[in-house]
Amino acid sequence: MDATQGLLNWKIGNVTVTRVVETGTEMPAMLFGGSTPQDLQAMGDWLHPFLTENGNPNLSFHTFAVQLGDLRILVDTCNGNDKERSPMFEAFANLSTPYLSLLEEIGFAREDVDFVVCTHLHFDHVGWNTMLVEGEWVPTFPNARYVFVQEELEHWASLPDMPLHGDAFVDSVQPVLDAGLVDLVGHDHQVCEGLSLHWSPGHSPGHVCVRIESGGELAFITGDAFHHPVQIGRPDLAMTMFDTDSAKAVTTRDRLLGDWADADILILGTHFATPTAGHIHKSDDQDSGKFFFA
Ligand SMILES: [Zn+2]
């Protein structure tokens, strides 16, 4: 977990983005298109900060806390505390992390959050939407508007028995809907001046990246369009078990890489371990991947 710990922050013009880490985990390399640890280690030194000593992908679960003028915006809310999850995902069940204290330390007290933006509605992006109070799931951020893409909400609402994401819908999505705190929006919605959604379907139907622009500078938050930097080198290495449509996810990654490579665009990875942010570059050495991240 060392590689994921600590607050980091970045400036995009006048906007400050702070990474607040909830937890981290090692994933088997084989989940990325059947890769071996050796395959990943061979892709080059640029990838090594994001691999464990064993050569497996290291994943961080963090929120990006965005201070934009007077507005405080959270992008994705990790897993949450006290959530019951299926045995296969027990690493994310019944957590008890100091996430809310970390947010408060950087000036994001629960009551002061203006927007909660979820890139998609998977369990590890909606968890802190709610918290357990006297046996009830209540909205964690009572004064926030929760921004969900309508198409994404309709998709998961139509699959109530889906293991894992169905549980998360019940404990982390439905309560904020019931409280009237949700804005259902299109997938290119502008949340406020300087922060908008950018459709990136495949991992889920209404999945969005988040675009931040200020003072002539530009950044994108990936969401799960990229689970790990390995997918920058090899966009075809899909995490099929978690994607709604892996072929579409690959097409989306190809498009985003074309748009983002060798441009002055800061890329903030939603599950990227430290250093978490960087730039995408076209690779001269195609053996080590089409693109690299540094
Ligand atoms: Zn995720």
Image: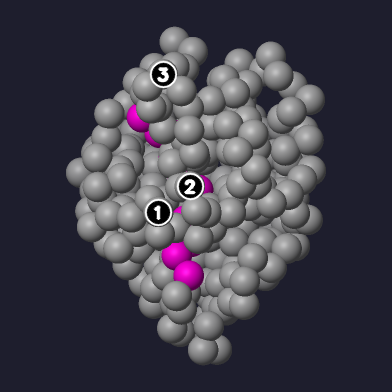
The residue that mark 1 highlights is: 111
Distance from disc 1 to disc 3, alpha carbons, whole Å, reads 21 Å
User: Would you say the beta carbon of the disc 2 residue lies within 8 angstroms of ligand 1?
Assistant: no
Task: Please state which of residues 241 and 220 is positioned toward the viewer in this rendering.
Answer: 220
Q: Across the whole image, how many numbered discs are drawn on residues?
A: 3
Residue 293 vertical position relative to residue 96 in the rendered view, above or below: below
Q: Residue furthest bottom?
A: 215
Where residue 44 sits: x, y (%)? 39, 54
Q: Are marks 1 and 2 in contact (CB under 8 Å)?
A: yes
Give the quarter of the image for residue 115: bottom right
The residue that mark 3 highlights is: 135
Distance from disc 3 to disc 2, alpha carbons, whole Å, reads 17 Å
Please provide the residue range marked out in magenta.
71-81
| Colouring scheme applied when the structure was drawn | one colour
Mark 2 surroundings within 10 Å by alpha-carbon count, few (fewer than 14), some (14 through 19), many (20 or more): some
Give the quarter of the image for residue 18: bottom left
Where residue 204 sits: x, y (%)? 70, 39
* Residue shown at 26% from the left, 51% from the top: 102
Of label 1 and label 2, which has the lower sequence position?
1
Q: Are marks 1 and 3 in contact (CB under 8 Å)?
A: no
The residue that mark 2 highlights is: 142
Distance from disc 1 to disc 2, alpha carbons, whole Å, reads 6 Å
User: Which residue type carries mark 3?
Assistant: Gly
